[in-house]
Amino acid sequence: MPKLQLHTKIIIGLILGAIFGAIFAVNPNKLEFRFNDNSQQVENWQEFTFLKKDSVLKSFGKEDQLAIIKYFKNLKDKKDIRQKIKLSDGSEKIFENTVTIEKIKTIGVWFKFIGDIFVRLLNMIAVPLVLASLIVGAASLTDLRHVAKIGGKTLGFYALTAVLAISIGLTFANLIQPGHIMDADAKDRLLDTYQEDAKTKIDQNVSMNIVEFIVNIVPKNPFKAIADGDFLQIVFFAILTGIFLMQIPKEKSAPVINFFSGVSEAMIVLVEKIMLIAPYAVFTLIAATVAEFGFSILQTLLWYSLTVVLGLLVLTFIEYPILLKIFTKIKLKDFLRAQRQVLAVAFSTSSSAATLPVTMDVCEKRLGVPNKIASFVLPLGTTVNMDGTALYQAVATMFIAQVFGFDLNLTQQLTIVLTAALAAVGTAPVPGVGLLMLIIVLKSVGVPEEGIALIIGVDRFLDMCRTVPNVLADSLACVVIASSEGELGEINPDAKYEGAM
């Protein structure tokens, strides 16, 4: 019997993780109260009331587990707060001196630490891999004009895909109009449950200043940029270092280039070894996500989620194949086959940065992209190319506007295109940050920022979905740029990892 390939194991892990998480889901009708010296569980309440002395602070129903947890967590003074709980059998319980109120964890979330270690290992590799590969790659370029030529092509291609992605998102949002479908009760419940989460993100006061963004590409301290994982600053420093290594005598530059070449090779081998635990890590990550969040919130936000996912599907399976056919001679089947592991890791980790080492390895070994192009295009794309995120921000802005009764005209929607494209450039390649950038887009068209509370509940799932086209577009740009330079090598979509079992 032939051994299963790694990508097949990852897909099996993903499917089994979803099933396992659904079976061992966190019970939405159970809560654990922790006190200083003990704990107690409560289930199947009919009414849950917070009291301060004899005054009612707030009451919740039987389906408000998450709202109860968040409300108690955000209370500033818990000292005199009591919880009065009316159970389904008619009895009542009163709790005092409560320290925390939490969900009761199940086996579905117990092993998430394995997935967290996997993500941290990939993040650990990303910065040294980018730095070393880019220095070596830039050292092989002849001059700054060559760098500027490749950089211009890369940024132009990323801008094209971003505008197309946002346009797709706006088209679906206008056709389906998910915000008009949401009922008032669901709106009030979501705003109530997630208002504190939304306030926390709004209070961060994010903004987009193009001049400041360009200035910040140049690092004051390259070592701080490396420590912070600021890919744009790392790319800038590495390119200059590589180019000017070629301007000094060869006997002095050769040892430095060889050193970084060795680091790059070591990181690639490390990626291959880490990927051996990918099936198990993906299993634990997906199981924990499904077990903790479940699918109930998707029912409430079904039309919004469906609008985003449909847009992402069109982006992935229509826009990208068309661009692949226009700019390269690669068969779509071969391109997607080569990306199987990349897409599985991107979906399960929700992080372009964590996926970057795998993407670089796949582009160089399976798609025939030379290191000097892959090491430039991919790190740049990880930071500035967020097509899936840009599409999601366009749909989310339209959805929130529709819920609040705003009728955005053509000019305002064109503003969304521009602002979402710029916001996507400034989006860090880590899970959840797209919500912060969404605030910028909402501000640009005058839609209430607190509206992000409507969509926070499904952000984790949609973050997983939108990371897939984010990383796929980076690989697409890689082959397009390499093809335009006449440097695309032999494609081998089924090349195995050296360490694969």
Image (cartoon, rainbow, N blue to C red):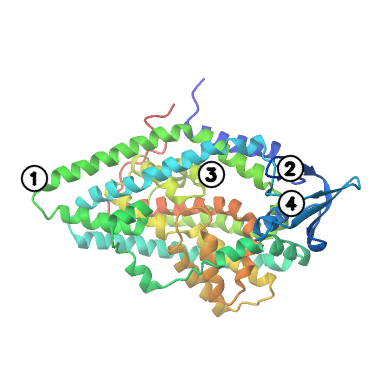
Please tell me in which quadrant of the rendered image residue 44 appears.
Answer: top right
* Residue 266 position (above or below residue 231): above
Q: Is residue 103 left or right of residue 329?
A: right
Q: Earlier in the sequence, mark 3 or mark 2?
A: 2
| Local crowd size for mark 4, using a 10 Å CA cut-off: few (<14), some (14–19), many (≥20) | many
Dot 2 falls on a residue whose secondary structure is loop
* Residue 57 position (above or below residue 347): below
* Gap between marks 3 and 4 measured at Cα: 26 Å
Q: Earlier in the sequence, mark 2 or mark 1?
A: 2
Q: Earlier in the sequence, mark 3 or mark 4?
A: 4
Residue 496: percent from the left, percent from the top? 40, 32
Q: Earlier in the sequence, mark 1 or mark 3?
A: 1
Q: Which mark is residue 209?
A: none
Residue at screen point 52% across, 49% down: 350
Residue at screen point 52% across, 39% down: 115
* Residue 255 position (above or below residue 48): above
Q: Label 4: which residue?
A: 65
Q: Earlier in the sequence, mark 4 or mark 1?
A: 4
Contact between labelled residues 2 and 3, with CB atoms less than 8 Å apart: no
Q: Is residue 192 left or right of residue 202?
A: right
Q: Amino acid at mark 2?
A: Asn
- Which of label 3 and label 2 is nearer to you? 2
**Between residues 280 and 202, which one lies in front from this camera angle?**
202
Q: Label 2: which residue?
A: 27
Residue at screen point 37% across, 40% down: 366
| Local crowd size for mark 3, using a 10 Å CA cut-off: few (<14), some (14–19), many (≥20) | many
Q: Which mark is residue 348?
A: 3
Instruction: State which quarter of the image contains the C terminus.
Output: top left
Q: Is residue 85 visible?
A: yes
Residue 92: percent from the left, percent from the top? 87, 49
Q: Label 1: which residue?
A: 251
